[in-house]
Amino acid sequence: MAIKRVCIVGLGYIGLPTAAVIASRGLEVIGLDVNQASVDIINAGNINIAEPDLDIIVRGVVSTGNLRATTIAEPADVFMIAVPTPFTKGHKPDLSYIKQAAEEIAPVLEQGNLVILESTSPVGTTEQLASWLKELRPELTFPQDKGEQAQINVAHCPERVLPGLILQELVSNDRVIGGLSKTCAEKAKELYKIFVRGECILTTARTAEMAKLTENSFRDVNIAFANELSVICDKLKINVWELIRLANRHPRVNILKPGPGVGGHCIAVDPWFIVDSCPEEAQLIRQARETNDAKPDYVLNKICRAADEFKRPIIACLGITFKPDIDDIRESPALNIVKQLAAKNVGQVLVVEPNLQKLPKPLVEAGLELCSLEAAFEQANVVAVLVDHQEFRETDKSEFASKVVIDTRGIL
Ligand code: SAJ
């Protein structure tokens, strides 16, 4: 199969960088998105998400005509689906965006096409995608009925890039490629070999789905261990950061960092897909999620107790994004803490966030305003470090000396 045209469904944090990188290798890439505003932004050579260097590469590939965005599906050799897979109430996976993607591409599918699911998905989703496509195009054959001889091949290759380093990791990371048949996986590898320098390892779709969920659950469980340690250390009056530094000197110990909770759209979500599939068996994975989800309330209570020491508490909250040096606030524990703090009316709340031009709506509605770091230090008596942004890490530590500090990120 000579791949000339690739259609990427979903132009978000994964879809747009992937589309741009493939287009930069000289292929024709069509970006399909339901959001007309995103399509217009991209077609003008601009970007709808913040990611280092993405603007430069998108501008380049749009100007050469290698990348074009649209809201209407067009025929292609490969369709790559990179849409969100959130969970609904009760932590049940919501596959509606994948179903919608299947409905969009089904009318233009042609014999010989390859469909790749990149979205992080519960085990069995690639099979489900293939059966939705079969229902919509019964005259075509799929791997579930014709195996290696299918007219349409379907594979899963989960994205694994780290926000902030997406463009590097898209190229350098190894890729796990799971096919619904061996041919599916091999054909998908042909596409990835065009832009991936890492190794492409072939397996089944179910194993690839589980591999991605396992990677994020591994991290979640390990962060939960660090978060539990931080609560234990508070009780035992031990500095958890010093403790971890010391323990990590053991050659086989590598404890991650505690924090105000786990945010982002991946690690705080994906482990639930395993819990949903195997509720009886996934005890540790569920507990890790619950431990990490309990951390924002724990931090909030600590801040409120510190504020109680003052007649006129002025609380500076440093950072609201879900991790350092990015502008992404999805599932951010820091944002959640600030929101709740404002609602509690325990004192004046100052928000410092060097990566945002304006505060998100719920904070504006709560009457909060963005504040400079200098102004925050001038006024505050309580300082809560919620994100370890570079600006905060580089602050002269003597600034903190006269404050009551809740340092959830160990920058001091
Ligand atoms: N965090 C801690 N302590 C740590 C490390 C992280 O509290 O020691 C917190 C962060 O502050 C943040 C959250 O965890 O709130 C997640 O941050 P992250 O940097 O660990 O991961 P993400 O969500 O940005 O990206 C993860 C990555 N997965 C793994 O590292 C296993 C990335 O490779 C995946 O592609 C991405 O999820 C995804 O899209 O699934």
Image: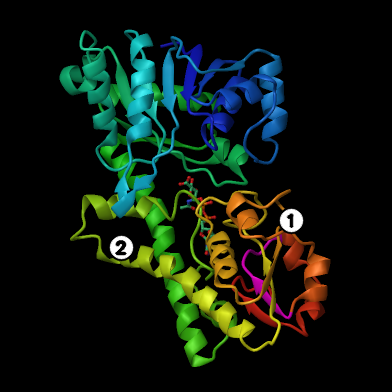
Q: Comparing marks 2 and 1, which lies closer to the viewer?
A: 1
**Label 1 belongs to which residue?**
354
Residue type (three-letter) at the residue carrying disc 2: Arg
Depth order, front residue of 179/64: 64
Locate residue 257 relative to residue 153 in the image: left or right: right
Quarter location, residue 405: bottom right
Q: State which quarter of the image contains the N terminus.
A: top left
Q: State which quarter of the image contains the C terminus.
A: bottom right
Q: Looking at the image, what colour scheme do you see?
A: rainbow
Q: Which residues are magenta?
A: 381-389
Q: Residues within 10 Å of mark 1 (few under 14, many from 20)?
A: many
Locate residue 245 relative to residue 316 in the image: left or right: left
Q: Residue at x 43, y 76 (%)?
A: 228
Q: Residue at x 32, y 36 (%)?
A: 95
Residue 308, placed above or below residue 390:
below
Q: Residue at x 70, y 23 (%)?
A: 45
Residue 177, placed above or below residue 265:
above
Depth order, front residue of 204/220: 220
Residue 335, placed above or below residue 102:
below
Locate residue 50 relative to residue 10 in the image: left or right: right
**Label 2 belongs to which residue?**
286
Marker count (numbered): 2
Q: Residues within 10 Å of mark 2 (few under 14, many from 20)?
A: many
